[in-house]
Amino acid sequence: MIDFGYAPLKINIHDLDKADLSLMDWITARDESFRLCIACGSCTATCTAGNFTNFSFRELCHSIRRGEVEKAVRESEKCMLCGKCTLVCPRNVNTRNIIKLVRKANQNFRV
Amino acid sequence: MKEHPFVIPFTIGLTFVILYTVVMWTIWVVRLTRREKKIIWKRLLTVKTLRGIWETIREGLFHRNIFKKNVILGFMHMSLAFGWFMLIVLGNLEARLYPHGLINPPYYPIFFEFFRHDLSPLREYEEIFTFLMDFFLLLVISGIGIAFFKRYKSKVMGMHRTTKHILIDRIALTSLWLIFPFRILAESVTAGLYNTGHFFTNFLGQQVIYGLPLDQLYYPSWWAYSIALGSFFVALPFSRYMHIPTEILLIFLRKYGVREKDSHSSYTNVELNACSRCGICIDSCQLSTDLGISDTQPTYFIRDLRYSKPSERLRETCMLCMRCLKACPVGIEITQIRKNERSEHQLFSPTSYSYLNGYAYPKAKVAFFAGCMGHLTPNIIKSTLLLLDAAGIDYTFIDRNGSICCGRPLQLNGEVDAAKQLIDKNNRLIYETGANCLVTTCPICASEFKKNYHMSIPIYHHSQYLWELTNQGRLVFNQSNLNVAYHDPCELSRGLGVVDEPRKLLKSAVVLTENSNQTKQNSLCCGGSLAITNTSAFQKSTIAASTVLQLANNTTDLIATACPLCKKTLAAAQNDVPVQDISEIMVKALMDSRKASLSEAKVKMASPKLEVVEEYK
């Protein structure tokens, strides 16, 4: 890497090559529709829980993709499973199933 | 009477099955909760016992519930159960009337013709007994014939799919099927030798098999009959035929008011053992008819739960639409059992919604609650509010700024602890509004409010409330000739039993036609059920499209429904028939009636009520 004399803070670097993608693989193996997400944010816009707290399914998907497993597990618990996101999703991502899969992964494997 | 060792297999089998049944009945009854035992004691000497006896005869012997669904299936079960029962009763009477004595060993009446070749001591009863025994034997064998035929050609009998049985069921089934052919053989051989039968066995013995060496067949045929009986009795407690002794107990417990609770109990065990795995639930399940998923239905779920634990797939692959519940001839509370099983595998913690503090609903007299799904279909909210305005109701839209989920979706997924938080929160907020009645457009919410909130105020689904207003003359609609088919939402029709109000309401404005017999309590699910998460969007719309196909025909202008989720799911699956909520249809009819009356009277459109209408346009 060329030394410009400055660099991003280490804390801000998220190295995807070193990310723990076990949760993502586990989920994708069980629900293919996870791949379909284009991060449009319709789910978050309509979210019942998101009306009361800082909860976003779109962000949760990002966390899973980035391997931020702990954050994903922590966030997934805020969901009320009401199912509005599934209805509005333009890509037919099975959102509720993905939430449940994150919870299951947490229980079964203590990721 | 000459003793003979061939009675041993039968005697062992009978003793075993009676002992097993007595022990299991005792265990189940002893393990009931104290409250349940108390109500049983209280009601033991009331008319409920008589009703229980009547239902046992009606269902156990005549299988009325199966008759109502399918006449041939009903006849098959009736001929076997009633025919066999009569054979036992008549055999016992015959043996008691015979001048031998009133106390007989259990095998004596069963193998009566073996022990007594000369029936003349029965005098005038000889003719009638031999005739009836032959008649009921013929009835039973006709049932066995149908059952055998059904195993291979179930479609002819109106069953598209039957249960795939496990080994022990096959063993028991084979023994059961062999009992009666062997009995006919044994009795025919005896009749051929000693003329002990009547029109059926005498005919077989003396006209058909008379050429065979009957005296050599005599002992083997009675041995075969006894072994078939014995092996059936030994297999019975471990197979599906345990439903025969268990269902009697189930009928009585149910009559005394014992019901499924929030978790598995002793009563659940009784229900599990009372399942005959007849497979009627398979054909009632839309996952099977529309998606070809035919291995997760209650028959399999209950079987696995009885022997061990059902797999995750079995537990979760169910829409909880309650169609099987209505179809089940035994009346097992399948949906509740599955929900309870789900709640043993909870994924959410009981503190997951601590962020909900500091939220409040405004004060209200009539509280209108739209719910999550309502907020996704603003047109339903708008229409309902318009109708409430037009009727002059002083209501408050309590969740205008967003509602907390009612908890039903979590509840259906078995997350009872997580749902509890939402229920407590919502319950307090609704209580604090001071409302004296709650109206909601969502049957899912209405169902949860009614079943788990234990609120002191009445809860109405908007179709009920609007019908009430129409009935009082506060809403007047223009009758049009729009041809409408009504789709019953599961939670409203089977869940809350509301089927008439939406129909009456619709009839006051449009022409309502019923195109299928799958309506009211037997209505089809739209496929969008919140209780299932492992079906894909494609699978959901397949179910929805097939539902629309059955609901509407080419003269249907519109499908009406009373649930925002059903509306969304049905509308998304097809483009042929528009789908509208009942409130949207009624608003249109209301506007038409206002226009008509205004133009007739030639008055300016200045009614104060219509201003409200304008506001929402």
Image: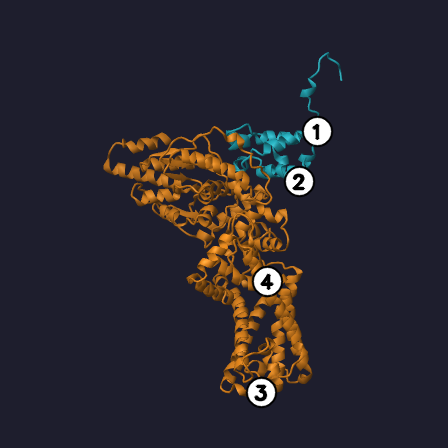
Q: Which amino acid does label 4 sit on?
A: Val
Q: What residue type is labelled 3?
A: Asp
Corner quadrant of residue A72: top right
Q: In the rendered structure, which disc, 2 or 1, sits on the residue that comes first in sequence?
A: 1
Task: Give the secondary structure at mark 3.
Answer: loop
Estimate the spatial distance between the alpha carbons at disc 4 and disc 3, rounded to whole Å.
40 Å
Mark 3 vs mark 1: in front: 3
Labelled pair 1, 4 in contact (Cβ < 8 Å) = no
Task: Name the disc covering residue B118, or none.
Answer: 3
Estimate the spatial distance between the alpha carbons at disc 1 and disc 4, rounded to whole Å.
59 Å
Mark 2 vs mark 1: in front: 2
Label 2 Cα neighbours within 10 Å, binned few <14 / some 14-19 / many ≥20:
few
Q: What residue type is labelled 2?
A: Asn
**Chain the render paints orange:** B
Q: In this view, does B67 lie above or below B208?
A: above
Q: In this view, does B63 lie above or below A99?
A: below
Task: Name the disc covering residue A19, or none.
Answer: 1
Chain ID, mark 2: A
Residue A38 visible in image:
no
Residue position for label 4: B23
Mark 1 and mark 4, same subunit? no
Mark 3 and mark 1, same subunit? no
Labelled pair 3, 1 in contact (Cβ < 8 Å) = no
Q: Which amino acid does label 1 sit on?
A: Ala
Residue position for label 2: A108
Q: In the rendered structure, which disc, 4 or 3, sits on the residue that comes first in sequence?
A: 4
Left or right: residue B162 versus residue B68 is right
Quadrant of the rendering where the N terminus of chain B is positioned: bottom right
Corner quadrant of residue B466: top left
Estimate the spatial distance between the alpha carbons at disc 2 and disc 3, rounded to whole Å.
72 Å
What residue is drawn where x is 59% and y is 86%?
A: B195
